Amino acid sequence: MSKRTSYVLLAFALGCSRCDEPDEQAPQAGQAEQAEQAEQAEPPPEPIRVLEPVEVNMDKVFLGRRLFHDPILSGDGTISCATCHSLDHGGAEPRRTSIGIRGQMGPINAPTVLNAHYNFRQFWDGRAADLQEQAAGPVENPIEMGTTFPEAIERIQADEWYAQRFASVYGGDEPITKEHITDAIAEYERYLITPSPFDRFLGGDEDAISAQARRGYETFKSTGCVGCHLGINVGGQSYQKMGLVEDYFALRGGELTEADNGRYNVTHDEADRHFFKVPTLRNVAETAPYFHDGSQEQLADAVRIMARVQLGRTLDDAQIADIVAFLGTLTGELPEHARLPEQDVPPPRTADEGSPGATSE
Ligand code: HEC
Ligand code: HEC
């Protein structure tokens, strides 16, 4: 077995240790024979799984939706989560790296919040366990939203709409807490699940995607992309080295940044240098630029580089175009109430202005 194949198999094993669906677990002893017969009758299961909706509390979703779009959570009243995670841009942002409060340039590209619930950890380096833990990060990050929770809570408590909503969702006698705020935002994000034409295809509707996209999916599988981009989120379930078979950073050129260290920044284990959480490829056609450094504007270029540095493969233009067509079928639809109606988007706030008051849902 070549080194490359064993890496890909390793990635599969990593992936499947995360699969909690009973039908994907190894058959129990005694069922082995049955399984063997079934295997002869049926094609092997697809490495990518149909997206499932998540059960949510809609009162929390509406509260979290507003917080997500509200610059009240930032120190100077100008930046909201949606500034860097726009629903018009696949839940990410069109910049290489983020620009936060007072125009400060962040070190890394913003990943999408869509379907982020299905990632096994949050952030490129996995430093947050889940969406609620993640949501606390940007608020107190000095170059993102640059405030503190006590300050943000004071502003939120003074806003009539929020005061009423928090009281009705979390209990009237309780003061608003950081946990309430991050819980509501996380609930909203859990709601941002985007079923796509490819899910309909997986569900048996052959015509849900074009012949070119079907060909692209076959190439995506046969080239080995599914070694890392697999499961319900087409990624999001393991850390992998950026540049597994060829040095990506040498190819990219330029200075190495701290962000380029990836998972190493969390573990300080040399073996983790340049490892990143494999990003989801759902909605990827909408989320340019690509990679943690935002270095690639074109999806075709990101695909070409991936094939080369992760798999040691050179794809021709037709194969790349097919894969790009397949990736386009992963662009999904937002659920009905995902968008905050235009007239309800809270305007920028300034410290002296206080709360501009609230509108209806
Ligand atoms: C200034 C831009 C900016 C703002 C404001 C911002 N984010 Fe982010 N977000 C980022 C960047 C950049 C990352 C990646 C950081 C990293 O991985 O180190 C990120 C990562 C995330 C992730 C992890 C996704 C994944 O796949 O790992 C989630 C979820 C998220 N942000 C939600 C939020 C929420 C909720 C808010 C508001 C409370 C918010 N963000 C505010 C830029 C921003
Ligand atoms: C060994 C694991 C691995 C394999 C194999 C792999 N990828 Fe990736 N992929 C990653 C990692 C890790 C990243 C994030 C790297 C970074 O940003 O530095 C990534 C990022 C991407 C991105 C950019 C996503 C974004 O939001 O920025 C695309 C597109 C992509 N991969 C497509 C592919 C395709 C197509 C193939 C097959 C030709 C493939 N990948 C093979 C691990 C892998």
Image (cartoon, grey):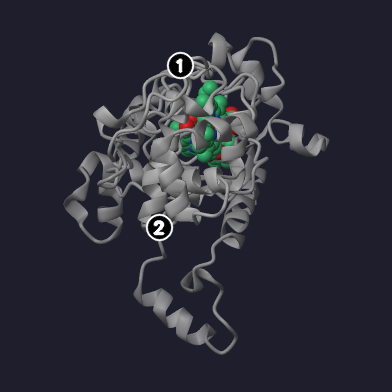
For residue 145, which quarter of the picture? Answer: top right
Please give the name of the residue rendered at 64% of the width and 29% of the height, measured from the top-left corner: 148
Depicted 115 relative to depicted 152: above or below: below
Q: Which residue does the numbered mark 1 point to in the structure image? A: 353
Label 2 secondary element: loop
The answer to whether residue 204 shows anywhere in this view is yes
Q: Which residue does the numbered mark 2 point to in the structure image? A: 56
Image coords of residue 114 (percent x, y): 41, 41
For residue 46, which quarter of the picture? Answer: bottom left
Specify the amino acid type for callout 2: Val
In this image, 342 relative to 263: left or right?
left
> Where is the C terminus found, in terms of image quarters?
top left
Image coords of residue 326 (percent x, y): 32, 40
Count of numbered badges drawn on the protein: 2
Label 1 secondary element: loop
Specify the amino acid type for callout 1: Glu
The answer to whether residue 228 shows anywhere in this view is no
Please give the name of the residue rendered at 40% of the width and 79% of the height, measured from the top-left corner: 38
Q: Residue furthest bottom?
A: 30
In this image, 250 relative to 20: left or right?
right
Q: Which numbered mark, 1 or 2, is in the foreground of this view? A: 1
Q: Residue furthest right?
A: 269
Residue placed most toward the observer, 241 or 75: 75
